[in-house]
Amino acid sequence: AQTVTQSQPEMSVQEAETVTLSCTYDTSESDYYLFWYKQPPSRQMILVIRQEAYKQQNATENRFSVNFQKAAKSFSLKISDSQLGDAAMYFCAYRSAGSGNTPLVFGKGTRLSVIA
Amino acid sequence: ETGVTQSPTHLIKTRGQQVTLRCSSQSGHNTVSWYQQALGQGPQFIFQYYREEENGRGNFPPRFSGLQFPNYSSELNVNALELDDSALYLCASSSQYNEQFFGPGTRLTVL
């Protein structure tokens, strides 16, 4: 079974600075997807960024980028120019690239605080 | 385009009771997945429905059951509630091979 580990229960960052959230995963599969989700106090899980394992290029979405190291099974999220609205729980998630829509496997999350 | 909606927002039940949670999927989506998120934890997969059939199940007992309707909306039923069932229940809808979009969740408290 696949597992996802987030070793930082809490992180904080100054507004406008950069922060990196860590994630490692364990799998024997070669084809899969990795995600970062944001969960603000409103509870709704929002997709931040997605990475296909077969792509060597790291995904980027505006201020959000990932460092995907397939051999090390590492998938970190970098948030640049942090904003107050970035404060939330961040979850790393894994999904097998099987047939159909396979379920997400989540880590325990990292609570990010942004200091004004 | 209407997103994923869930009802009710909050619910309080007592141990041993039964509960039904509802989810309306996003327009065009035929797959609904349910997740349980205990306090301080990441969501855990309960089961998935595709075209009205259960299409995968996580490590949850049979007292967790579900339905999907022809319009692809879904229900999660939990019988014989236990204190540990207290959690946020998240529904996510998707088309068969694409991203899962989450609803705002139902907070269930079991006393």
Image (spheres, coloured by chain):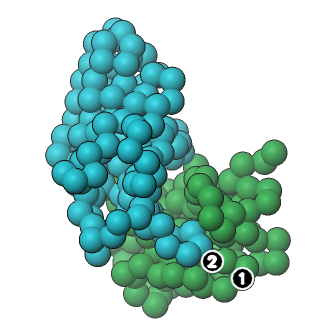
What's the colour of chain A in the image? cyan
Q: Left or right: A14 with respect to A52?
A: left
Asked whether disc 2 touches disc 1, contact meaning CB atoms under 8 Å apart, the reply is yes
Residue appearing at x 31%, y 12% in the figure: A17
Q: Identify which residue, A59 or A13, lies in the foreground.
A: A59
Q: Identify which residue, B11 or A61, lies in the foreground.
A: A61
Which mark, residue B52? 1
For the question of whether residue A91 can be seen, the reply is: no
Which mark, residue B49? 2
Q: Position of residue A27 (x, y in %)?
A: 27, 67
Mark 2 lies on a secondary structure that is: strand
The residues tagged by marks 2 and 1 sit, at their Cα atoms, a distance apart of 6 Å
Label 1 sits on what residue type? Glu
Q: Is residue B32 above or below residue B80?
A: above
| Quarter of the image with the N terminus of chain A in it | bottom left
Q: Position of residue B40 (x, y in %)?
A: 29, 51
